[in-house]
Structure formats: structure tokens, C-alpha cells
Image: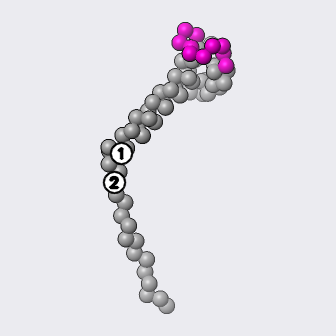
């Protein structure tokens, strides 16, 4: 029988906040953008003309609890 035993030498280094912060900000803005289109893209706050975005996210809007009609 072999006496070889696996001993991992690599340790995980923490990610500095300075490198993580831009990705957190980008993800937060992306989520706010998505919530706007699902929750508020209709009527007076509409950016896109017509009802295309509303119809595209209609079922998701109800699933998340946003009333639309």
C-alpha cells in the first residue's frame, strides 16, 4: 500500500474590497435597472413607447407582486 497522502498546499486568499466594489456597484445598478423594467415601465414613467416591455414582463410582474391593471 502506498504512503502517499494528499495535502493541499493552496490557501484561499481573501478578495480585497477595492477589487470587489466595482462589481458590487455594477450588479446593484443592473438589479435596479431590472426592477425598473419589471415594476415601473408603463404609463407616465415609461421610457419605451408602446406596451412592448409591459407585455414582455407581464407574467413576471404578477409573480413578483407588482400590480399592473
Numbered tag placed on residue 60 in the rendering: none
Which residue is located at x 56 percent, y 23 percent? 37
Q: Residue at x 67, y 19 (%)?
A: 52
N-terminal of the two: label 1 or label 2?
2
Asked whether 16 or 4 is in front, the reply is 16
Q: Secondary structure at mark 1?
A: helix
Q: Position of residue 1 (x, y in %)?
A: 49, 91
Q: Is residue 19 left or right of residue 43?
A: left
Task: Indicate which disc residue 14 carries.
Answer: 2
Q: Is residue 5 left or right of residue 35?
A: left
| One can see residue 58 in this view | no
Frontmost of labels 1 and 2 is 1
The structure residue drawn at horizontal position 52% and vertical position 22%, both measured from the top left corner, is 36
Whether residue 38 appears in magenta in the rendering, the answer is no
**Above or below — where is 44 with respect to 9?**
above
Is residue 63 visible to us here? yes
Whole-angstrom CA distance, mark 1 to mark 2, is 11 Å
Number of numbered tags placed on the structure image: 2
Quadrant position of residue 39: top right
Query: Residue 49 in magenta?
Result: yes
Position of residue 18 relative to residue 47, above or below, is below
How packed mark 1 is, by other alpha carbons closer than 10 Å (few <14, some 14-19, many 20 or more), is few
35 to the left or right of 59? left
Coordinates of residue 16 in the picture (x, y in percent): 32, 48
Residue positioned most to the bottom = 1
Labels 1 and 2 touching (C-beta < 8 A): no
Q: Quadrant of the C terminus?
A: top right
Q: For the stretch drawn in magenta, what is the main secondary structure? A: loop
Magenta range is 43-52
Provide the residue designation for mark 1. Answer: 19
Q: Quadrant of residue 49?
A: top right
Amino acid at each position: 500500500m502506498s504512503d502517499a497522502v494528499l495535502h493541499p498546499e493552496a490557501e484561499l486568499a481573501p478578495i480585497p474590497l477595492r477589487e470587489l466594489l466595482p462589481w458590487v456597484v455594477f450588479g446593484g445598478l443592473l438589479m435596479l435597472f431590472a426592477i425598473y423594467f419589471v415594476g415601473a415601465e408603463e404609463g407616465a414613467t415609461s421610457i419605451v413607447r408602446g406596451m412592448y416591455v409591459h407585455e414582455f414582463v407581464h407574467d413576471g410582474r404578477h409573480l413578483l407582486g407588482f400590480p399592473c391593471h
